[in-house]
Amino acid sequence: MRPHLAPDPTKRLSPQHAFTLIELLSVLAIISILIAITIPAIHSYRVSATKSKCASNLRQLAFATQTYANDHKGKAPYPRVLNDGSPSYAHAPHYYQVAAYNETLAPYLGNRFDSMYCPGALSDDPQGTYDPEAQRASAEPNDFVSYQYFQGSSSGAPSGNVKEEYSDLFSNILDAPGHCAMWGCLTYTTGSRTFGHMEGRSTSGTIEGMNAAFVDGSVRWVPFDQLEPYTNDGAYYWPKPITN
């Protein structure tokens, strides 16, 4: 039988290392700093990525519009089909009827749910109107989309008429001024609501700006101070055109 050896009281045991309170607080402070740096960077990246996706959509819309015009002697794609089957341009700027889309832009763009909806704050729509996935799942998709079309004709009951100086701006897209916008994010404000690339139904506020596609094929972000009312009721905005 092996004898039991008691610990030598004269020898100190090496204590196991443990975090002190100061060390723990230091680690937490470092983590907090990293979070404070990372979260804004992630948000900024997401905002930039969304703007880039939106710009890509608009670039394709502008190309499809120009291609349609080339195939139809300069005529702009029509956003509405009347009950008698005739084409019409008269309605709100962000109205593009499903039937009209199928006849005009679908051959160039394919699925409207992948091309006619801004991916910014507008798409986070609790009512589903501007949410492309909600519209894709709907048996009867809404005719309103979240890109507005500056085709230059009278709009319908939801808004006022297009300003007179712009009414014939795109009567022949092949001869239209290259620095004028054809398409852009729905940018709309009244006393009760505001819609824009950065302002959805749940995040209404002061409009920051919009992505816009121009006749010359360029696409750029246009800040709000470079926008002006497009319709005479002052509700819809678009980039200030230089018509001189």
Image (spheres, rainbow, N blue to C red):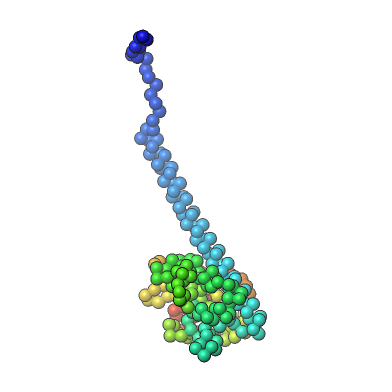
Residue 67 in picture, x, y percent from top left: 64, 77
Q: Nearer the viewer, residue 129 or 222?
A: 129
For residue 4, side relative to residue 115 (left or right): left
Residue for point 50% across, 69% down: 118
Residue 35 in picture, x, y percent from top left: 44, 48
For residue 133, side relative to residue 25 (left or right): right
Q: How many marks?
A: 0
Residue 224 visible in the picture: no
Q: Nearer the viewer, residue 202 or 169?
A: 202
Q: Quadrant of residue 109?
A: bottom right
Q: Nearer the viewer, residue 181 or 131?
A: 131
Residue that sits furthest to the front in the current view: 1
Residue 143 in picture, x, y percent from top left: 47, 78
Residue 83 visible in the picture: yes
Above or below 208: residue 99: below
For residue 107, side relative to residue 50 (left or right): right
Residue for point 42% across, 68% down: 125
Q: Quadrant of the C terminus?
A: bottom right
